[in-house]
Amino acid sequence: MHTIDGDNINTENIKSFKKMPTIKQLSVFLERRTGSLRGVMETLTEAKINITTMNIDGTPEFNIVRLLVSDPEEGYSLLKKCGFNVCITTTTHVCDSVEMPQSCLLNAKMLNGQLHVSGLTPGRVWSVFNMYGDVVFQSVAESENETITLKEKDLFVVQTDNRTARVSY
């Protein structure tokens, strides 16, 4: 037994935990202004670096965009060359899309000016962002499948529950 901050800790139990696998992610610090996210997306798209997951957190002035991409080192190098404030960090890797059940996948497709999204969790918030990072739609999912009409043409990012899908229109 060891004592940490007055609590007895059984170190044998700690040793028995499996080490969680980690995955590299890009963390990009952006000023919150029109077009800042577009530059990141265009840079990665032009280099054919796929984004599998995106999370945006921030304040009224700044955002931190966390990206799981197909080639984090190349993405880092390209974004750094383009003047972005970017770093590579690690995060716990729970499973990849090959292991992920179909019910966990978020899918988005455009058909006749309508965005069809499947894989939503009823009762959870889902959002659609344009390439500028502006929210163009946000709602609480009523079902696993939702359809909305989009007026503008752009590359859109659909996000819910730390799952992301991209679709262009």
Image: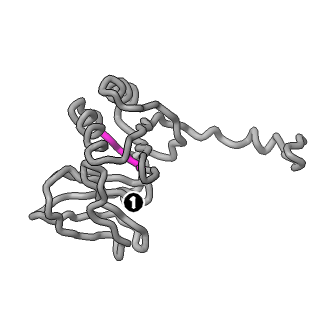
Please say whether residue 52 is one of the residues in the magenta stretch.
Answer: yes
Locate residue 9, reporting x and y percent.
Answer: 84, 46
> Residue 160 is drawn in which quadrant?
bottom left
Residue at x 35% of width, y 76% of height? 142
* For residue 140, above or below residue 106: below
Instruction: Return the residue found at the far bottom.
Output: 142
Q: Secondary structure at mark 1?
A: strand
Residue pointed to by mark 1: 160
Residue at x 16% of width, y 65% of height? 114
Locate residue 96, reporting x and y percent.
Answer: 43, 44
> Residue 31 is drawn in which quadrant?
top left
Q: Main secondary structure of the magenta part?
A: strand
Question: Which quadrant, please, contains the N terminus?
Answer: top right
What sort of colour scheme is used for the picture?
Answer: one colour
Locate residue 21, reporting x and y percent.
Answer: 55, 38
Question: Which quadrant, please, contains the C terminus?
Answer: bottom left
Residue at x 52% of width, y 40% of height? 91
Q: Tag 1: Cα neighbours inside 10 Å, few (<14), some, or many (≥20)?
A: many
Out of 54 and 39, give the one closest to the viewer.
39
* For residue 133, above or below residue 141: above
Residue type marked 1: Thr
Instruction: Specify start and end residues of the magenta stretch as a single range.
Output: 50-56
Please say whether residue 47 is one of the residues in the magenta stretch.
Answer: no
